[in-house]
Amino acid sequence: MKVIKLKQNSSLKGKFRIILSDPVTKEIIQTGEWQENLISNASNCGHNLIIQHLYGDITYPLEITRARFGTTNVTPLEAHSDIDSPLAYDIEISDREYVSTTEVKFYFFAPSVYIPDDTYYTFAVYANSKVFGMHLLDTPLVKSGATDITVEYSYSVSNVV
């Protein structure tokens, strides 16, 4: 078995971008910039889930399964176990991609009819019911009218020897 060595400055990190499209024509209206996603350190969330699985405790699944937007302008912290005021609707995974041995991508798709018109300030991804990563959007997402939302989310390990 090959042992993977991590450099001293190794990190696990997530990043995402939001893509808005027309629900009828599917034409892309806007592609946002990549934003870093904070991985939670709260109990039973994010990094702690990884540690639990390495230990052999699989009480909570580690698989990323859904995402949500939040309507409160509150910066998530590593110790938080969720974003404030998450939207009740779960944004489902429409596709996933095993990019390399150090990166995986998820594509979350929210049809316009399921996301109410509102201003969204935060975004979070979940391993089933437990938050994994979250972020205060660099620019709030103002949804008004017919707009489908796709979120491309990447989780990677960097500085692997």
Image (spheres, rainbow, N blue to C red):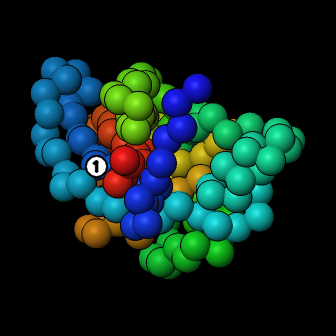
Residue 65, image x, y percentages: 59, 34
46 left or right of 68 in image? right
Question: Taking the image as drawn, is residue 107 in sight?
Answer: no
- Look at label 1 and name its amino acid: Arg
Residue 57, image x, y percentages: 85, 44
Disc 1 residue crowd, few under 14, some 14–19, many 20+, Cα 10 Å:
some
Above or below 161: residue 80: below
Residue 93, image x, y percentages: 49, 29
156 left or right of 47 in image? left
146 left or right of 107 in image? left
Quarter the N terminus occupies:
top right
Residue 66, image x, y percentages: 56, 38
Say which residue appears at 37% left-offset and 47% top-offset.
161
Question: Foreground residue, 140 or 67?
Answer: 67
Say which residue appears at 29% left-offset and 60% top-offset.
35
Say which residue appears at 63% left-offset and 35% top-offset.
63
Q: Quadrant of residue 122?
A: bottom left
Q: Dot 1: what SS?
A: strand
The residue carrying mark 1 is 17
Say which residue appears at 26% left-offset and 68% top-offset.
139
Question: Foreground residue, 161 or 103?
Answer: 161
Q: How many marks?
A: 1
22 left or right of 88 in image? left
Q: Quadrant of residue 109?
A: top left
Question: Foreground residue, 74 or 57?
Answer: 57
Above or below 101: residue 82: below
Question: Taking the image as drawn, is residue 58 in sight?
Answer: yes
Above or below 42: residue 131: above
